[in-house]
Image (cartoon, grey):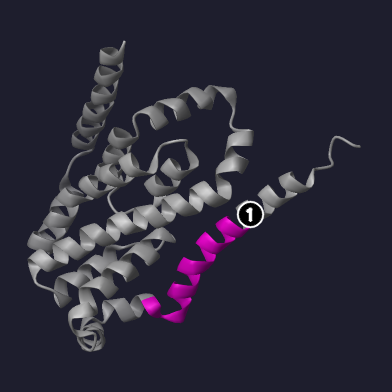
Amino acid sequence: MSESSESPPARASWLRTAVWLGFLLLVPATLWFSGALDYLRDTERVRADVSTLGPLAPFAWVLLHATLEGFGVPATFIVIAAMVLFSKPVALLVCVLGSAGGMAVGFYLARSIAREWVAARLPPRFRAWEAHVSENAFLVSLGMRSVLFLAPGPAYVMGLSRARFLPCLLGAALGCVPGLWLMVYWGGEAATLMTRIPIWAWLVLGAFVVGGLVWRRVRRK
């Protein structure tokens, strides 16, 4: 057998990974070119449609948020629409639950489809990093969600690692609360404030998270 030949399991792993990556690119592209994202911007139309759901509207919105964010669609439009559709406390709750659900969807996709492929090709120098992420799943997930906010990347990173699901979910849920609270209760003012935060402030936040990880590791020793 030649060195270039691959076993059926290896080919299946390649295929699953290719399908996963293709789907992650296809879903946002389809929503963009089909005008679905423009629909979310039309708050009056969305309000009219959602009002027909009655008391089921918050549950439907959580499901929509979780699905779209999990498949890589930017959730900013969903949060803004929720701010118009619901009262502030309800909007905050559905956005937090939706973001946590999006993390769960992204985590499951990465873990079930691409984890084996990545693990088999992970360079040795990154295995220690992966082990560190897995051992400190809650803090790493909390830090990434706090800094990257609604970006779907943290869910994929944690899903590709060996981290347990529950700490990742709790960290992501808590990490998105401050940013969502600012968006829901302060709206445009919060967005302007976020853009004005200097880079050194983000570096301080990152140093704080790293310091917490180091302190926890030293305590274990």
**Relative to residue 26, is residue 221 drawn left or right?**
left
**Relative to residue 136, is residue 123 drawn left or right?**
right
Quadrant in which residue 96 is drawn: bottom left
The answer to if 122 sits in the magenta stretch is no
| Image quarter in which the C terminus is found | top left
**Viewer-closest of 192 and 111:** 111
The magenta region covers 19-36
Name the residue: 37% across, 53% down: 104
Name the residue: 55% across, 63% down: 23
Mark 1: amino acid: Arg
Name the residue: 67% across, 48% down: 13
Name the residue: 45% across, 26% down: 131
What is the residue that sits farthest to the right in this orientation? 1
Provide the major secondary structure of the magenta segment. Answer: helix
**Viewer-closest of 192 and 116:** 116
How far across and down, in percent of the image, does residue 40 sit?
A: 30, 77
**Viewer-closest of 197 and 21:** 21
Answer above or below: position of 52 versus 36: below
How far across and down, in percent of the image, does residue 59 sit?
A: 25, 72
| Image quarter in which the N terminus is found | top right
How far across and down, in percent of the image, does residue 15 sit?
A: 68, 54
Answer above or below: position of 157 versus 68: above
Answer above or below: position of 50 versus 164: below
Quadrant in which residue 46 is drawn: bottom left
Residue matched to label 1: 16
Q: Secondary structure at mark 1?
A: helix
Answer above or below: position of 54 versus 141: below
**Badge count:** 1
